[in-house]
Image (tube, rainbow, N blue to C red):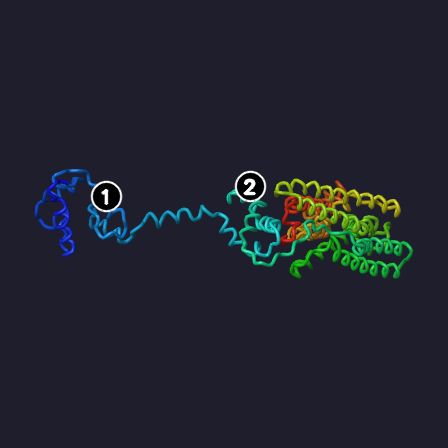
């Protein structure tokens, strides 16, 4: 700035010209005229004020939005872009940070109903696991495990002033006399029916058998409605329940009559109906059938031990992996305890009735029925229905293929079953069918019944 004040006069003149709508600023020539001196300096990136040349710098009007003086370095296309988006940086930066700043917010909205009705973070953790959220998924939400994620979700849900009732932290089911007596009832009725069959003949024996089967069926149904073998509310549709029930009845009926029927078909029969004895043309396997009815009580106690132990470990665990590691040996222990009790009952019934204990058929069938019931009780009904149906279909197909092989040109249908029976006897068919199904359910149970969602109050039915 020189001492004559020429710069101030020049700015005053430009202000006057700006107010009148004629700006005297460097710009491109509007016609075919040549560039003037000031415009050439502006194009080269320099400005002259009072004969002093200096690099062009952004003025206050360029850096302050809303200033009255336009930018000295603005161009027409720059002005149009600035009018369309006056602050592009401020409008883009918050949008880029919004998703990464709060990764739990979307999960909270997705499971808001679960989080609002939960009375503690444990219910939220079990519900999240039932929906497929694992510790690896929780790591994407910046949490070490599902329990830590559930605690944050529980803390974020807005609460009213009324406190929620605190549930029992263990929720361990107690032993009650009603379900203990009900589980003993099928075995007692089974022993009475076997005794009646041994003491009667002819038509009275048939009446005793029919009446005994009906009474045992009602007793088993009562035992499955109370206690640890009872399914919680939310039963499956009628057709699914009826199909599972029909398959179970078929498997039990085959354990009583199936081996005798298969042996008779292989020998060219059957030539007569079953007489209710073990030495008839169509023998009855009363020893394994009686042992299975007596095994209702050990099955209930093993289910009770599994549920009670899982609830205690669930209350004391701080991670899903810790609970799974503790629940897996508990499940295997309860399963092994039941098999041991069933083996003892088979040996006892075989010794008392002087019959074959049929260990392979009875043990595999008992294991299948126990695992299917445990999965049903803990909200997993689809897999038991499929495996029970598959085992029943295999047992039904064995005598059907043998009978179909008698048709002209269809002998090849009976070859697989005939070879299996010749090599391993009639017991190979139910042992193979029920054993494969039980092994499948055991693998499935080790994956599902060792999860917190299977034992928490918020377990989701499959």
Considering the image in quadrants, where does the N terminus appear? Answer: top left
Along the viewing direction, whichever of 351 and 25 lies nearer the viewer: 25
Q: In percent of the image, x 90 and y 58: which residue is there? A: 201
Looking at the image, do the residues carrying marks 1 and 2 touch, with CB atoms under 8 Å apart? no
Task: Check disc 1: other Cα within 10 Å, few if <14, some if 14-19, many if 20+.
Answer: few
Distance from Cα at disc 1 to Cα at disc 2: 50 Å
Along the viewing direction, whichever of 30 and 61 lies nearer the viewer: 61
**Residue identified by numbered label 2:** 144
Where's residue 253, x and y in %? 77, 54
Residue at far front of view: 3
Q: Earlier in the sequence, mark 1 or mark 2?
A: 1
Badge count: 2
Q: In percent of the image, x 86 and y 56: which residue is there? A: 193
Task: Check disc 2: other Cα within 10 Å, few if <14, some if 14-19, many if 20+.
Answer: some
Q: In percent of the image, x 52 and y 52: which residue is there? A: 108
Where's residue 368, x and y in %? 72, 48
Say the numbered circle drawn on residue 128.
none
Where's residue 196, x and y in %? 89, 56
Q: Is residue 3 visible?
A: yes
Residue at far left of view: 33
Query: In this rendering, which labeled residue sits more in front, label 1 or label 2?
Result: 1
Q: Is residue 414 left or right of residue 75?
A: right
**Residue identified by numbered label 1:** 58
Along the viewing direction, whichever of 3 and 209 lies nearer the viewer: 3
Query: Mark 2 falls on what kind of element?
Result: loop
Query: Mark 1 falls on what kind of element?
Result: loop
Q: Is residue 407 left or right of residue 43?
A: right
Q: Is residue 197 left or right of residue 43?
A: right
Q: Is residue 462 visible?
A: no
Where's residue 261, x and y in %? 78, 51
Q: Is residue 136 left or right of residue 439?
A: left
Along the viewing direction, whichever of 430 and 268 lies nearer the viewer: 430
């Amino acid at each position: 700035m020189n001492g004559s004040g020429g710069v101030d006069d020049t700015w005053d003149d430009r202000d006057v010209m700006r107010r009148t709508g004629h700006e005297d600023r460097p710009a491109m020539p509007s016609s075919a005229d040549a560039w003037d001196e000031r415009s050439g300096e502006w194009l080269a990136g320099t400005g002259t004020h009072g004969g002093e040349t200096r690099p062009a710098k952004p003025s206050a009007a360029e850096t302050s939005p809303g200033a009255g003086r336009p930018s000295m370095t603005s161009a027409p296309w720059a002005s149009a872009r600035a009018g369309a988006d006056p602050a592009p940086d401020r409008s883009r930066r918050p949008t880029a940070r919004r998703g990464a700043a709060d990764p739990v917010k979307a999960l909270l909205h997705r499971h808001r109903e679960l989080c609002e009705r939960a009375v503690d973070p444990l219910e939220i953790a079990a519900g999240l696991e039932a929906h497929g959220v694992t510790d690896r998924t929780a790591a994407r939400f910046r949490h070490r495990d599902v329990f830590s994620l559930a605690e944050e979700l529980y803390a974020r849900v807005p609460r009213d002033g009324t406190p929620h009732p605190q549930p029992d932290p263990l929720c361990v089911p107690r032993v009650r006399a009603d379900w203990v007596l009900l589980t003993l009832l099928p075995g007692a009725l089974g022993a009475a029916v076997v005794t009646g069959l041994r003491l009667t003949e002819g038509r009275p024996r048939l009446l005793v058998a029919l009446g005994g089967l009906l009474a045992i069926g009602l007793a088993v149904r009562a035992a499955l409605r109370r206690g640890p073998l009872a399914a919680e509310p939310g039963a499956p549709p009628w057709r699914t329940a009826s199909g599972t029930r029909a398959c179970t009845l078929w498997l039990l009926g085959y354990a009583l009559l199936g081996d005798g029927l298969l042996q008779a078909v292989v020998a060219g029969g059957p030539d007569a109906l079953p007489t209710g004895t073990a030495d008839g043309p169509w023998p009855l396997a009363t020893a394994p059938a009686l042992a299975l009815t007596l095994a209702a009580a050990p099955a209930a106690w093993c289910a009770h031990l599994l549920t009670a132990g899982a609830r205690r470990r669930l209350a004391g665990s701080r991670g899903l992996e810790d609970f799974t590691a503790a629940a897996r040996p508990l499940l295997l222990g309860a399963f092994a305890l039941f098999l041991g009790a069933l083996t003892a009952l088979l040996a006892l019934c075989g010794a008392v009735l002087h019959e074959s204990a049929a260990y392979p058929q009875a043990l595999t069938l008992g294991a299948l029925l126990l695992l299917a019931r445990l999965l049903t009780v803990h909200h997993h009904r689809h897999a038991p229905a499929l495996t029970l149906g598959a085992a029943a279909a295999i047992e039904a197909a064995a005598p059907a293929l043998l009978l179909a092989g008698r048709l002209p040109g269809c002998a090849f249908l009976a070859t697989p079953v005939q070879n299996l029976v010749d090599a391993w006897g009639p017991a190979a068919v139910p042992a193979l069918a029920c054993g494969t199904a039980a092994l499948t359910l055991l693998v499935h149970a080790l994956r599902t019944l060792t999860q917190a969602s299977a034992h928490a109050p918020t377990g989701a039915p499959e």
